[in-house]
Amino acid sequence: MKRNNDWKLTLTSTPMILIYVMAVFCIIAAIRQPAFLSPATLVNLCRAGIFTMCFAICEMVVIISGGIDVSFPAIGCVAMYVPMYMYNNGMGVDNVFFFFGVAMLAGLIFGVLNGFLVSYLKLPPLIATLATSSVASGGLIMLLGTREFTTLPPSLEALYSINLLTFVDPNTGFNYPLTILILVPIILCLVMAYVMRYTMLGRGLYAIGGDSNAARIAGFNVRKLQFIAYIFCGVMASATAMIYTTLMHSSTTTALMGEEMIIIAACVVGGCRLTGGHGGVGGTVLGVLLITLVENNLNMLGIPTSWQTFAVGLVLLLGAVLSSVQAKRISKMGKI
């Protein structure tokens, strides 16, 4: 009987529900548009999901630790804009390590600021990161202006040109290159899956997200772990912003603004709870895949562009409701 219940829980778990939804979406899209099954679709989805995946893993770590970070889009804008501004004004060198180094330094500074506000001043994470977002966004525009940079330095252009493979559509002759930068989210997911599952750091983040007082009594340094979570989010979000600049050939002061809600929604749909202490890389990856799949292929279902945001919102709402129902059901069965 217990084994049957375990199987029932597995088949109706949040990750499996997401897989069912994605399978149904893919089947419908393939029926409506057979081109959906082309390798070109897979390449496009991989490219579209690079930024979302990296941002979601960053946010996942903060949410698991019991916090929330809505400042990473603004931090990312600072991180992508400052090195490009420096280079275009003769204050930097044409080197990939310079661009990413400056970007990640900016992320480190803002990550430390968020960690200080949350762990030492005890500000609510939402308020603290909202303040940081406003400071970063407003300060960037006030100090450096709103010029848009659309030409990449040669070193970033060279990085952009490196591809793992290129699919040539036999029907149209179009090329669909898969950038080597796809390795970044893959490696990030593998590393963080190991860290969160098998290290004391990961266990500490889950512990302080579940109950910070109990974690402190158990010997975890709550302040240190909160600092680590926000610094990680700031630094990795900044590196992701430079990847965005490289692939999109664009750097503006507002390019990433507004992305925080969709990223947080992806984490929640994937099983992270805003109360902290729950979630994982696997569920977050599935949440990102679902959102990327829906966002980039609704046109194949004949849904007008004006309705696409509404449709994505419905999918996210459905996923969040199913996750909530699943959590309550497991709780009643005494699993948590």
Image (cartoon, helix red, strand yellow):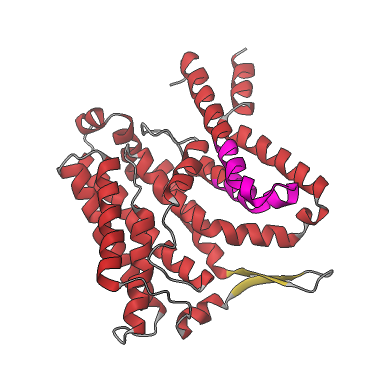
Magenta residues, dominant SS class: helix
Is residue 275 shown above or below 200? above
Farthest residue in the left direction?
121
Q: Is residue 47 left or right of residue 205?
A: right
Q: Nearer the viewer, residue 237 or 139?
A: 139
Farthest residue in the top direction?
1
* Res 105 seen here: no
Q: Is residue 185 left or right of residue 98?
A: right
Quadrant of the drawing holding the C terminus = top left
Magenta stretch holds residue 302: yes
The image quarter containing residue 209 is top left
Is residue 1 shown above or below 155? above
Write down the region rendered in magenta. Answer: 288-316
State the residue at coordinates (61%, 59%).
46
Is residue 72 shown above or below 179? above
Farthest residue in the right direction?
171
Q: Residue 72: image x %, image y %?
A: 36, 54
Q: Is residue 253 left or right of residue 318?
A: left
Q: Residue 18: image x %, image y %?
A: 61, 37
